Amino acid sequence: MTTLNRANRELYRRGPDEAFATLKDLHDHCRQERQYSSDVWQMPHTLQPQVSDGELRLTLDKGDSVGLNDWSFSQVCRLSGVSKETINRFQPETATMAFRDTLPHADKPVQILTTGQTVRSVHGVAYTRLWNSELIEMIRDVATDFTPPQIAVNGGTGLYCGEQDMFCFLIDPTGWIDIDGESFAPGFFVWNSEVGRRSLGMQSFWFQRVCQNHIVWDAVQVVEFSRKHTANVRDGLLEIRRHIEALIAKRDARRDQFADVLKKAMQTQLGSDSDEVAKELVKHGIPQHYIKDAMEIARAQGGFTIFALVDALTRLTQRITFAADRADADYKVAQLLSLALVA
């Protein structure tokens, strides 16, 4: 079993104005942001930086003067090839001249997302936006029994949306199953950014406890998925839906079977000795560099049961830096539980 800290990290980086009490409240906020947002396509060198009331602003082709938030300012700096730290040392008038001299004369326009009189993001033509409201609508449609966890010690709710990204932490408080006297319930995290701050993604799991710091303790069957905001990002939305539906299907149709599988996995040895266990793990696609550490962890837990090895490998895969590699490793590890069905 492993400990998941993603919601804990979100808890302590969010201000009170980014937290929402219910999924409906979060959806209403995201839907309103979408309603008042629009995309402008414009050649980068025509953005016409200017100073108004001591503030750096951009002039769009349609004549509107728009301000920048911290994220879009960072993107304009990258587009110009000028360090944000350098620009921040300039007076607004000097910063304006720097941008005018460095904004590229490109042959393709940039995509400028504005909400009201503020630029939220600046992207190239390859970026495809998935609205936060679209993701939440899907969640509300399919995960009807899932709710946020208990309120955290600092008032955090597990439902957040700021100017850069959105994050949801949901659990099913009625979905508990008992396995050898230990209870597990399903839950998942989902995240997205309308402005390119992070990928679209989710992490699903079965857990035993969530503390008031929103740390998820003793999680099993941890599976992660992510998708970049490119042309096929909406395929990622469908994939997340399938992940949630699979979680619900296990809770509903296979609750007893899932409990039996885990119970059997806790009792079934994968092999009679270290060599046999290692060969079996290799046969099922587990990378060699994880096998030794996983076997040492499992041995310390009392033996080479399927459950002990899955638990050990799940802990190790959480250290993988890149989401795509972690998702692939999680899938292979989760498949090991199926060995309990044929044991």
Image: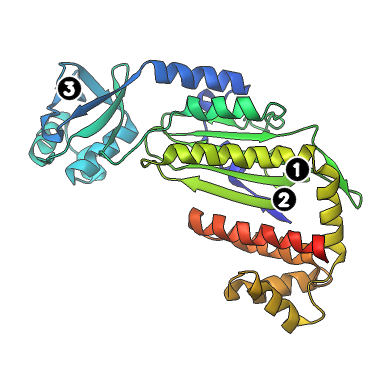
Residue type at the position of mark 3: Leu
Circles 1 and 2, Cβ within 8 Å, touching? The answer is no
Measured Cα–Cα span from mark 1 to mark 2: 15 Å
Residue at left 45%, top 34%?
165
At x 25%, y 38%, the residue is: 125
Decide which of 330, 92 is in the foreground and name it: 330
Amino acid type for the residue under numbered disc 2: Ala
Q: Toward the viewer: 336 or 294?
A: 336
Q: Does residue 214 appear in this view? A: no
Distance of label 3 from label 1 (alpha carbons): 51 Å
The count of marks equals 3
Q: In which quarter of the image is residue 327?
A: bottom right
Tag 2: Cα neighbours inside 10 Å, few (<14), some, or many (≥20)? many
Please state if 90 lies on the left or on the right of 138 as rendered. Answer: left
Amino acid under disc 1: Lys
Looking at the rendered structure, the secondary structure element under dot 2 is strand
Q: In this view, does 8 lie above or below 69?
A: below
- Residue drawn at x 55%, y 22% as measured from the top left: 26
Numbered disc 3: secondary structure: loop
Q: Mark 3 points at which residue?
A: 60
Residue 108: assigned label: none
- The CA distance from mark 3 to mark 2 is 50 Å
Report the residue marked by disc 1.
Answer: 250
Residue that carries the numbered disc 2 in the rendered image: 219
Please say whether residue 315 is visible from this viewpoint. yes
Residue extending farthest to the right is: 181
Tell us which disc is closer to us: 1 or 2. Answer: 1
Is tag 3's residue or tag 2's residue first in the polypeptide sequence?
A: 3
